[in-house]
Image (cartoon, rainbow, N blue to C red):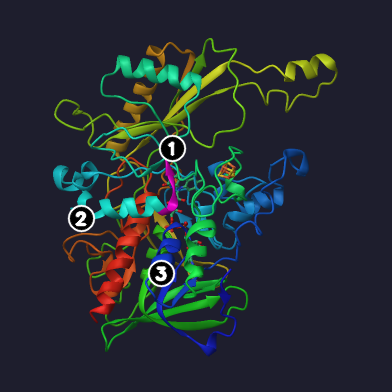
């Protein structure tokens, strides 16, 4: 891939520094490099090269010692993240080491982190939905949080821009509150999903069931292969068929000749030049040697992921910013959000026994938000809304996995698929509460002696009311669609389980109540841009990463235009 800047002292100065190489950092690197800026990407984790560093991508269960499980040793390493249910033998090497990187849960909070080149872009679920003015106007309309400084029209061209390059497959629907993306051909609903779609859409005018909109290629694009439906994405994709920094944005950045990548570089703080009134660079700790070094640039993009970017800003103190860079408002660290998740219903679908499908589609269904869209759909129990993800599949294929049996009858029974099942689980919007927050903890240090984060966040009455409605609606929809043996559930997960943590350095119109302006610049230090989830002012109910991509491309464009005008 790129140059390794091994002898850092030879050249410590760049046009731009990007902190973090995940979904948003990859986009920042691509955009800044393509616009001609010599760009240094500082990544705290190790190098992961596309394909070469995906050691489990082709392993079958019988190739692995624990058939995908974690040894007691690995369970210790992931003693926090392991609770998410997302970590196994196939992908644990892409999840952060909790022993080296502790955090404190003042109230229970699941923080899923990935510390390597590409960050969580290797692991994510790829669900991509545009936000709309229902989201960007929500705070102003119901009075929670502060008003977004942008509207849909400001970000719309940037959604199109990133979608064309990332490749998003999906079906247009024409809903104003879930705008259509620039789509590649959609994946297909299976027979049971089509059946349930027709029942829900007949019984509930205004509700829709669609195939998920995902960052998977259904046709080849820019030299990347199309998805082979192996559903082994979180091990890395040898075809480059889903969007990741490693397969898509970093190679594009590298192709310009303007990219320098430095792995094992933990950004400790941003250096503020009191005389010039702007940031001059960053201070890093080499994760392998513990050496402390400084790098300099005209602009700095913070893309370490929502909470880690805020951690860096809080740790960047100076005479001008004694409480953290850009923290004049006192809002840095506050207004932490996520989506509620794992509440819904499941059941058995009778019939369709003669229907079989080959392959494993790495996607499910989506039921877009249908409450609080207008006066007619207004709820008197809560503000904001929720959508459902889920899917149908045939059970029974793995039924024999844990049976200690043998013989011809046993083998025959393994060849018979079970009944069709279907489930849906809601994702609800969380409000921005000042008291949901993170702050530096100087009593608990990480492996490199750095202060860690304490996270103090909980669901409140509005989220609980949304969750109650999700469970009720999920059960009712499945009942009316004719499913049997329906089980509704609320796994009562704490914040963080949605893995959509957002906020803590919000955008806003007023520097007195927000950290960033409408182009993601720190109000009082304009050459620092924060374009990951930290910048979010509200949380919508749809997956957020597509919006981070669009905001990043938009901010990079603004940064370069401001540099040219000598405004930064
Ligand atoms: C299992 C799973 C499923 C998901 N599914 C979806 C989905 O379907 N749709 C969706 O929209 N989102 C999904 N997400 C969330 C999505 O992955 C994140 O929103 C997204 O990756 C955030 O991008 P980012 O650039 O902010 O951070 P990340 O991708 O987390 O990257 C941050 C990078 O910064 C580096 N870093 C951190 N601190 C420092 C430091 N001090 N110095 C240098 N580098 C640093 C990290 O090592 C990392 O490489 C999912 C996540 C997971 C784990
Ligand atoms: S399902 Fe598609 S994107 Fe995922 S690993 Fe397989 S080919 Fe790649």
On the image, the x and y values in percent for residue 297 come to 39, 81
The answer to whether one can see residue 568 in this image is no
Residue 34's disc number: 3
Position of residue 105 relative to residue 446, above or below, is: above
Q: Quadrant of residue 280?
A: bottom left
Taking the spot 17% from the left edge, 61% from the top edge, the residue there is 509
Q: Determine which quarter of the picture holds residue 482.
A: top left
Q: Is residue 250 rendered to the left or right of residue 307?
A: right
Q: What stretch is highlighted in magenta?
A: 165-169
Query: 205 or 320: nearer the eye?
Result: 205
User: Residue sitting at 44 percent across and 52 percent down?
Assistant: 166
Question: At which x and y percent is residue 213?
Answer: 41, 39
Mark 2 sits on what residue?
150
What residue would you read off at disc 1? Answer: 185
Give neighbour class at mark 1: few <14, some 14-19, many 20+ (Cα, 10 Å): some
Identify which residue, 482 or 248, lies in the foreground.
248
């Amino acid at each position: 891939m790129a140059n390794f800047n091994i002898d850092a002292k030879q050249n410590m100065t760049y046009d731009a520094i990007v902190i973090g190489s995940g979904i948003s950092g990859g986009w920042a690197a691509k955009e800044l490099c393509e616009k001609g800026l010599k760009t240094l990407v500082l990544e705290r984790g190790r190098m992961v090269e596309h394909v070469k560093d995906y050691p489990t991508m082709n392993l079958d269960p019988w190739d692995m010692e624990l058939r995908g499980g974690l040894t007691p040793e690995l369970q210790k390493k992931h003693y926090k993240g392991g609770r998410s249910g997302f970590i196994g033998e196939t992908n644990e090497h892409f999840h952060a080491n909790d022993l080296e990187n502790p955090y404190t849960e003042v109230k229970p909070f699941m923080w899923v982190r990935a510390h390597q080149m590409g960050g969580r872009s290797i692991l994510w679920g790829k669900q991509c939905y545009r936000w709309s003015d229902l989201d960007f106007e929500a705070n102003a309309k119901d009075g929670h949080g502060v008003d977004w400084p942008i509207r849909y029209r400001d970000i719309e061209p940037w959604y199109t821009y990133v979608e064309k390059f990332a490749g998003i497959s999906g079906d247009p629907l024409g809903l104003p509150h879930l705008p259509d993306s620039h789509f590649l051909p959609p994946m297909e609903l299976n027979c049971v999903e089509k059946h349930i779609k027709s029942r829900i859409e007949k019984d509930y005018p205004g509700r829709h069931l669609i195939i998920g909109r995902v960052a998977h290629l259904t046709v080849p694009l820019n030299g990347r292969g199309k998805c082979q439906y192996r559903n082994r994405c979180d091990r890395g994709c040898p075809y480059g068929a889903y969007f990741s920094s490693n397969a898509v944005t970093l190679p594009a950045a590298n192709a310009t000749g303007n990219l320098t990548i430095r792995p094992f570089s933990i950004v400790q703080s941003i250096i503020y030049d009191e005389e010039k009134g702007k940031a001059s660079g960053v201070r890093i700790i080499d994760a392998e040697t513990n050496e402390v070094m400084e790098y300099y640039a005209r602009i700095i993009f913070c893309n370490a992921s929502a909470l880690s970017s805020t951690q860096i800003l809080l740790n960047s103190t100076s005479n001008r910013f004694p409480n953290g860079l850009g923290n004049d408002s006192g809002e840095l660290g506050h207004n932490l959000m996520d989506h509620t998740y794992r509440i819904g219903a499941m059941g058995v679908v009778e019939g369709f026994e003669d229907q079989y499908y080959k392959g494993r589609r790495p996607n499910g269904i989506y039921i877009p938000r249908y409450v609080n869209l207008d006066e007619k759909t207004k709820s008197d129990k809560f503000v904001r809304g929720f959508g459902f993800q889920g899917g149908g599949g045939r059970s029974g294929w793995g039924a024999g996995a844990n049976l200690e049996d043998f013989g011809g009858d046993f083998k025959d029974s393994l060849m018979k698929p079970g009944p069709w099942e279907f489930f849906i689980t809601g994702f609800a919007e969380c409000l921005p509460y000042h008291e949901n927050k993170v702050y530096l903890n100087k009593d608990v240090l990480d492996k490199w002696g750095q202060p860690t984060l304490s996270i103090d966040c909980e669901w409140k009455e509005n989220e609980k009311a949304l969750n109650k409605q999700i469970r009720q609606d999920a059960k009712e929809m499945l009942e009316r669609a004719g499913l049997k043996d329906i089980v509704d559930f609320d796994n009562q997960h704490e914040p963080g389980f949605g893995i959509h943590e957002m906020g803590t350095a919000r955008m806003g119109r007023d520097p007195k109540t927000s950290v960033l302006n409408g182009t993601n610049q720190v109000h009082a230090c304009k050459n620092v841009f924060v374009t990951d989830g930290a910048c979010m002012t509200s949380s919508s109910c749809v997956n957020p990463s597509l919006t981070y991509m669009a905001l990043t491309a938009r901010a990079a464009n603004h940064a370069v235009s401001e540099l040219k005008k000598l405004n930064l």
